[in-house]
Image (cartoon, rainbow, N blue to C red):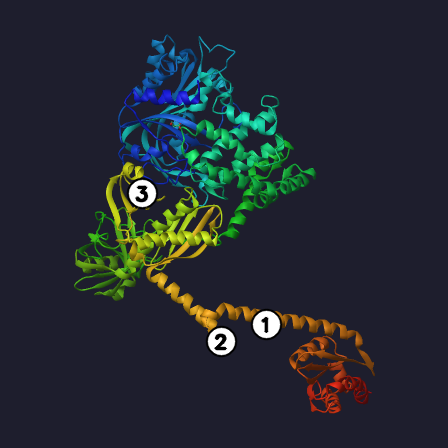
Amino acid sequence: MTVAKLRELYVKFFESKQHLHHASGSLVPIDVTGRLDESLLFNGAGMVQFKPYFRGVAQPPQPRLVSVQKCVRTGDIDEVGDDSHLTFFEMLGNFSFGDYFKAEAIAFSWEFLTSPEWLGLDPTRLAFTVFTEDDVAYQAWSQHLSAAGIEPATRIFRLGEETNYWPAGAFSSGPPGPCGPNSEMFFWTSNNEPAPSGAYSREDYLRDEAEGKWLEIWNDVFIQYEWQGEHKNPERPNEGYRKTGMPELPFASIDTGMGLERTAAVLNSFRSVYDTDAFQPIIAKIESLSGAKYGVSEAGDRAIRVIADHIRTATFCIADGILPANNGRGYVLRRLIRRAVLKGQRHLGFSEPFLSEVFEPVLESMGDFYTVLGDQAPTVRQTLRGEEELFSRTLSRGMDLLEKMLSKGLRILPGADAFLLYDTYGFPLEVTTELCDEAGVVVDLEGFETAMAEAQERSRGASAMDSAYGGVTLAFEFEEGPTPTHFVGYEFGRAETVIVAALPELNEQGLGTGRFAVALRETPFYAESGGQTSDSGTIEGATFSLRVLDLVKQNGIFVHLVEPVAMRGMESLVGGNGEEIAQLLQEELFGQGVIATISIDRRNDIQRNHTATHLLHAALRHHLGKHVTQAGSYVGPHTLRFDFTHNAAIPVELLREIEQTVNAEVLENTPLVTYVDIPISEAKARGAMALFGEKYGDKVRMVEIGDFSRELCGGTHVAATGEIGLFKIVHEASAASGVRRIEAVTGRGAMSWVNDQVALASQAATLLKSTPKDLVHAIGKLQESLREERRARQKLAQQGSESVASGTDVNGVELITQRIAGSADDAKLLVDRLIEGKPARVVVLAAEAEGKVMFVGKVGADALAKGAHAGNVLKELARMTGGGGGGRAEFATAGGRDAAKVDEALQAAAGFLASMVK
Ligand code: SER
C-alpha cells in the first residue's frame, strides 16, 4: 500500500464516521485562531493547531475532525537513520471536541486497524498499552480482544506517564497545555517470528518492545486537563517547567495520531520506513547523484537515510516560511541541512552542492498533497543551495582544524574548541560530537555550554530585538477585578465615563511614586498591542485632572497609568504610604464621572504608521516572495519598524520599488474596510495574514485595504490610505539572523524627515559655499583638490627623503639644504618633517612658487646650543637673492627675488653656519 493510499483510506474511514477533513497546520505552530504557540518550536502533532478547540475558547467547524498533519520532531535526531525514527513525518489523526470519548475512540481504532474493509491487520499481532490507572481504556480494548478470541491480559499492558500520558510525562512536568492519559497501539514487526501467544506478561512485552519487535503505530489521547506551569528558569527554558495546576478542561476530548510512514511500512511488511514509497524516490535520486548504492554498507545506508529524512524536514520547513538562522526554528533547520551535507560529503563522496536536487523527488511525490511545496519551490531550491554553499565555504577549513585538534591524541575535546567550531566554522554541536565519536573522543558538553553562555553574554545588548519591542510592564492587582473595559477607541477619541478602579503605583519600599493606575468603564485609549503603541491623553473629572502616560491590558481591563495634574491631596502621592494613597484614590476618584480624551494628533500619527505597516507587509510579500512573514513590529507616532523573515539585504533599487508600491496604494486613497467578528475560517479563506503572538478568538477582526492587503488585526487605522500622505523607508538592516528590519516614516514624520534632508543639504552647501543643487559638483571639486593636495604632499615627502642624503657636516652640526617646487607652507611642513627627531640638524629650504622664492629655516635643539641661528643665516641668503627677512634662532622665514641666485645662496649657507658654530 502506498502512503497516498493510506492517507486516503484514513480520511475516508473517519469521514464515514461523520468527521470533517481539516487541512494540516503549518510547521510553525500557529493554531486555528492564528496565534503562535510559544511553548513549541515546531508543530509536532495533529492536536497542536486545535488547542483552542480543546480549551473551548474557539468553536470547531464540527465536533469531529480528521486531519493529515505534517510534523517535525527533532528530539530523537540521533536515532534518525535507524528503521523507524524520522524528524519529519505525517500524522493521521481523528479528533473529538466534547463529542465521543474513550470507548468510541478505541472502537474506531480497533475497527480501522482490524476490519478487512480497512487495514485488515491480524489482531494477534497487535498490542496495547494504557495508563496505569486507566481501567476504562483497559476494559474497552479487552472487549474487542475477547471478541476476537484473544486473552486480553496477554495484549494489554499498564504503563506510567512517560509513555502513557500526552505529552510524555505531562502529568508531572508539562509542558503547559491540554493533556491527558493515552493508549498506544503496537504492531508485531518481527517478521520471522510468529506473534507471541499463550502466557505473555508485561515483562515479556517490555523486553520485546525494547528489542524493537513491537512498533508503535498509533496513539489515542484522552484529553481532559489543562496542565499549567511556568518555566523554572525563564532564562533557560530547557530546564523545564514548574507545575502550578492542572484543572479539568470544560469537556473531555479525543486526539489521536497514527504515524503514516510507520503504518505504511507495517502494511507492506517492510522492516523500515525507508522502504516505503515515501522514501524510495528520494533514495533513488541520492543514489543516482552520488553513484553510491543503497543496501551495500551500513555507514553508506545511514548517510542516505539521514539525507532522505533531513531533506523532507528542510523542504517543508522552508516552504512554511522558516529560513536558516542562528537561533530558534531557523537554527534547527540549519543544523539539519548541515548534517545532511556533511553526511553526503563524508560518506557518499559529494563535493558539489546536491541538496537542492534531492528536493525534486520530494516535490514530485508530495507536491500533489502539499501544494505549498510547488508554490514555494523556487525559494526552497534557492535556500538549500545558498545554505549548502555557505557551509561548504567553511566546512573544509573547520574539518582541517578539527583533525588537527584530534591528532593531538586527546580523549576529551575541550568545550571552547567545540564552541570555536560551532561559532566560527558553523559546525552544529551534534556534528562535532558525531565526528569526535567516530574518533573515540568525548566532547566536553558542559564546557561548550559555558563558552556559549559567555558569548551570549557578550553579545547581549548588541541584540536590537531586546528592547525594541519592550512596552511597559505594569502589574496591578485589582482585588475585586473590575469588569473588562469596553474599548470605544475605534470610533471615538473621547468618552464620557466613570472610574471603576484606581490603585497606587508603589516603589520597592511600598511607597507611592506619584503615579497611579486607573480603570474606566469604557475608554477611547488604545492599550499597546500588536505592535501599536498606547495612546496618551487626559482624564478630567469635576475636581481633578489626570495625564495618561501609558496603558497595558490586563485580563481585558485597560489599565491607564496616570499622573495627576490637579487633584485634592496629590502632595501625599509621592512617598506616601501605599494604603493611605489607596484610600485617597478611593475617596477622590472611585465612581467619579470623567471625560477621557486621547491626544488625537498623536493617535493619527500612529494610525498612519499602522496602516502603512500593513501596506509594507503586503508589498514585501509581493516583491520578495511569500516566505516573508512578520517577525515583529513597532508602530509608534514618529516611526514604524517592521521585522520580517528574509535572508538577504534588500538592494536599494528593490527597496525603492517596494516603497513605490506602498505609495501607489496611498495615492489610490483606498478606503479601509474592517470586518468585525467574522469567523476565522472565512478570514483565512480570504487570504488574511495573521499576526503572530496575537490572541484571536474564533471570531476575528480583519482589516482590508482593497484587494491589496488583508490582516487579522485589533489595531486602529486610517479611514483611507490617502491619509498616510507619504511613505518613506529610512533604514533597512539585519535585525537578527534571517530577519530583516525596515524603518519607515509617514505623514508628519515623513514631512519632517524630508525637511531634515533639505536642511542637511543646504547646510552642507553653505559650508562649501555652493547651493544644494550644485552640491554634488562642489563635493567633486573638493575631492579633486584634496587629491591634488595629497599628490603634492607625497611628492614633497619624496623630495624630503631624497634630500636627507645630502646633509653635510659643519663643525658637528648636520646641515641640510634643499630647493623645492612649492609654497612657503609646503616648505614649513617639510622643514618640520626633516628636523623631527634630529636635534643636531639645521635645515634650510628654498621654495619656489609662481616666480617667488621663500627661504625657510629651522634649527634643532643641539645645533641651537652650539650657536646655530636660523634668522641670521636666512638674512644672508635673502640678501644674496635680492630680498630680505629673518627671524628667531630656532625658526625663520625670508623672501628672495632672484631665482637664478638661489643655488648659489644655498651653497653659501654652510659658510654662514660655520661662522656661528665653533
Ligand atoms: N498527540 C498525540 C501524539 O502525538 C496523538 O495525536 O502522539
The image quadrant of residue 914 is: bottom right
Figure check: 846 above or below 327 = below
Mark linked to residue 695: 3
* Residue 59 visible in the current orientation: yes
Q: Would you name the residue on which mark 2 appears?
A: 769
Q: Amino acid at mark 3?
A: Lys
**Is residue 293 left or right of 855 when viewed as pictured?**
left
Quick one: quadrant of the N terminus? top left
Disc 2 vs disc 1: Cβ atoms closer than 8 Å?
Answer: no
> How far apart are the alpha carbons under marks 1 and 3?
62 Å
**Is residue 126 left or right of 841 when viewed as pictured?**
left
> How far apart are the alpha carbons under marks 2 and 1?
15 Å
Q: Measured from the top left, where is residue 205 in percent x and y? A: 46, 16
Q: Measured from the top left, where is residue 821 in percent x and y? A: 70, 78
The image quadrant of residue 796 is: bottom right
Q: Of label 2 and label 3, which has the lower sequence position? A: 3
Quarter of image, ligand 1: top left
User: Badge 2 local density, few (<14 within 10 Å), some, or many (20+)?
Assistant: few
Q: Give whichever of 159, 449 is nearer the camera.
A: 449
Q: Choose mark 2 or mark 3, whichever is in front.
A: 2
Quick one: quadrant of the C terminus? bottom right
What residue sits 46% from the left and 27% below the top?
365
Q: Measured from the top left, where is residue 673 in percent x and y? A: 25, 47
Figure check: 797 above or below 907 = above
Q: Amino acid at mark 2?
A: Lys
Q: Would you name the residue on which mark 1 appears?
A: 785
User: Badge 1 local density, few (<14 within 10 Å), some, or many (20+)?
Assistant: few
In the structure shown, which secondary structural element does the residue marked by tag 1 occupy? helix
In the structure shown, which secondary structural element does the residue marked by tag 2 occupy? loop
